[in-house]
């Protein structure tokens, strides 16, 4: 019989990431939700293929690049044992700024939008 068990604590101790007091090492890659035949649509088989390849290559973590992924991706990563670095939809590198103060993340008028997106991601994916 199997059951899902959640983490109790996540901490940085001496620069080392620890889960439940045990140091872990993350070996990960960036991933965009993309299929070589379907484009932006990824079905379950495509996701399992990605996870299987990642595991074969000894990766244990994946970054959901630039935006939250489909819920199924998180479920499959949990089943197959991959850490996920989630990312809210706050990507702004496409906005050209020549001075640091002109970057959207430095503009106080964007604070609410960024916090709202991050909050929704955490509430959805926790």
Image (spheres, rainbow, N blue to C red):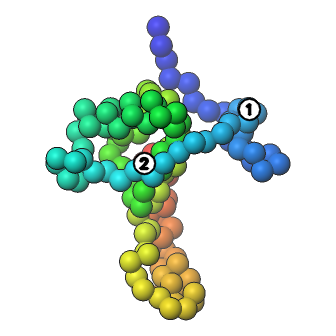
Task: State the residue position of label 1.
Answer: 22
Left or right: 120, with 22 as reference point = left
Residue 120 is drawn in which quadrant? bottom left
Position of 118 relative to 29 (above/below): below
Q: Which mark is residue 124?
A: 2
Q: Secondary structure at mark 1?
A: strand
Q: Residue at x 62, y 33 (%)?
A: 7
User: Where residue 16 sits: x, y (%)?
Assistant: 75, 45
Tell me the mark number nearer the camera, choosing from 1 and 2. Answer: 1
Position of 105 relative to 37 (above/below): below
- As rendered, which of 3 and 87 lies closer to the eye? 87
User: Where residue 61 sits: x, y (%)?
Assistant: 52, 41
Position of 91 relative to 31 (above/below): below
Residue 26 is drawn in which quadrant? top right
User: Where residue 11 sits: x, y (%)?
Assistant: 72, 44
Q: Is residue 47 visible?
A: yes
Q: Secondary structure at mark 2?
A: helix
Q: Residue at x 51, y 67 (%)?
A: 115
Tell me the crowding category of disc 1: few under 14, some 14 to 19, or many 20 or more residues within 10 angstroms, Cα based.
few
Furthest residue in direction front, as rendered: 57
């Amino acid at each position: 019989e199997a059951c899902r068990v959640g983490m109790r604590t996540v901490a940085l101790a001496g620069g080392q990431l620890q889960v439940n007091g045990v140091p872990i090492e993350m070996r990960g890659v960036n991933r965009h939700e993309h299929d070589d035949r379907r484009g932006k649509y990824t079905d379950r088989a495509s996701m399992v293929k990605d996870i299987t390849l990642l595991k074969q290559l000894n990766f244990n973590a994946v970054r959901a690049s630039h935006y939250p992924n489909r819920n199924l991706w998180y479920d499959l990563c949990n089943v197959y044992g991959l850490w996920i670095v989630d990312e809210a939809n706050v990507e702004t590198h496409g906005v050209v700024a020549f001075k640091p103060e002109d970057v959207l993340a430095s503009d106080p008028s964007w604070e609410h939008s960024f916090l709202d997106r991050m909050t929704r991601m955490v509430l959805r994916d926790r």
